[in-house]
Amino acid sequence: MNRNTYENPVAEPAERLPELAAGVAILGADAEISSWNPQAAAMTGYTLEQVLEAGLASIFEPEEVMRHILHKGGAGVPTPSEYLQLRHADGHRCAVVVQCAPQRQLRQSACHVVLVFRTLDAHLRNLRQDEHLLVMGRFASSLSHEIRNQLNAVALHTDVLDDVLQDVPSDTRPVLAESVADIRHEVSRLHELVENFLSLARLTRLDRVPVMVATFFESLLDDIEPLLAPQGIHLHMDIGADLGEVQLHTNTFRHLWLNLVHNAMDAMPHGGTLTIRSECSADHIYLTIADTGNGIAADQLPLLFVPFHTTKTEGTGLGLYVVQEIAAAHGGWIDVSSELGVGTSFILTLPLFKPHERTSDTE
């Protein structure tokens, strides 16, 4: 088993950004717009070329407030939410919320600026959704703990039944033993379901700290190697030793990877190869887990992250949904590709942590 093969990536992958329900403009160190996403074009009615000609500040009112926001961003100072008027290319106006997030590279005085703006209605919907998620998270946590307590009681009584079975006449023992085994199996599935719910509930209050990527995977090996060997699965790990740090809630992030590993194991019931590898760009790390299983049909790929959708007879349908939510809670996202008869790859993208970007959740 190739336990640790540390290699630097040969080439940097193309930069990828998640889809956002907001207008996003990225300004270079020269304060010129270098990226103008489709939502920004739709919300303003301006193409990138048109907004460059008109001037970004000129399509917001008051214009001087927008200039101040951009000036602060260029100076490396993040701005709070500001309420402005957006003047659409066709002349109509709408209320928007604007925020600036500077991204300074180490030892450089100038910085890039990410400007995000959304309509006031969308902003208020986001706030209500955040409040809703917080309440649901608390509810899910309380309910899951209660269910887990009851499941522990059922498991205890099942152990007692096992002991009693030793005194049951041999002709009836097999039938009763099968029933006890069925109870254990269902309790195990319910435990898995509860743990997934608890993982979702914890996402509302993650305290993340900078962790070396290579160090995390060194510790993860101790968890996954004992799982793979009995199933005849060969592990190839190619994680660069100098990838740097990402901000993690370690236990939750470990849960993400164990879900992905179990998913790969289910795809290779007769053995195969599991590959975990890394690539890196200036701002992001790309972590791939690939199996040599049967693959997934193209029409099933869009449904993989839908909660309670599963193609497995024994699945809960929450595993990959939890993976997606944990990735999002870490500021990242996950992609999937698959080919029938070849295998499946999941690619997790995370922002690299840079010391000058330390935030309150790391202090």
Image: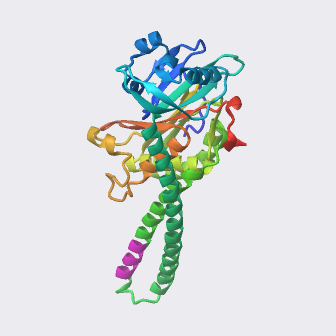
Residue sticking out furthest to the top: 53
Q: Residue at x 66, y 27 (%)?
A: 77
- Magenta stretch: dominant secondary structure: helix
Is 348 one of the magenta-colored residues? no
Query: Is 267 displayed left or right of 288 in the figure?
Result: left
Which one is nearer the viewer's eye here, 255 or 129? 129
Q: Quadrant of residue 278?
A: top right
Residue 120 x %, y %: 46, 37
User: Nearest the camera: 71 or 177?
Assistant: 71
User: In the rendered view of the protein, which quadrant contains the C terminus?
Assistant: top right
Q: Residue furthest left?
A: 299
**Left or right: 150 as drawn, with respect to 170:** right
Residue 122 placement: quadrant: top left
The answer to whether 360 is drawn above or below residue 141 in the figure is above
In the image, is residue 147 above or below residue 293?
below
Q: On the picture, is 247 further left or further right than 307?
A: right
The one of 17 and 117 positioned closer to us in this rendering:
117
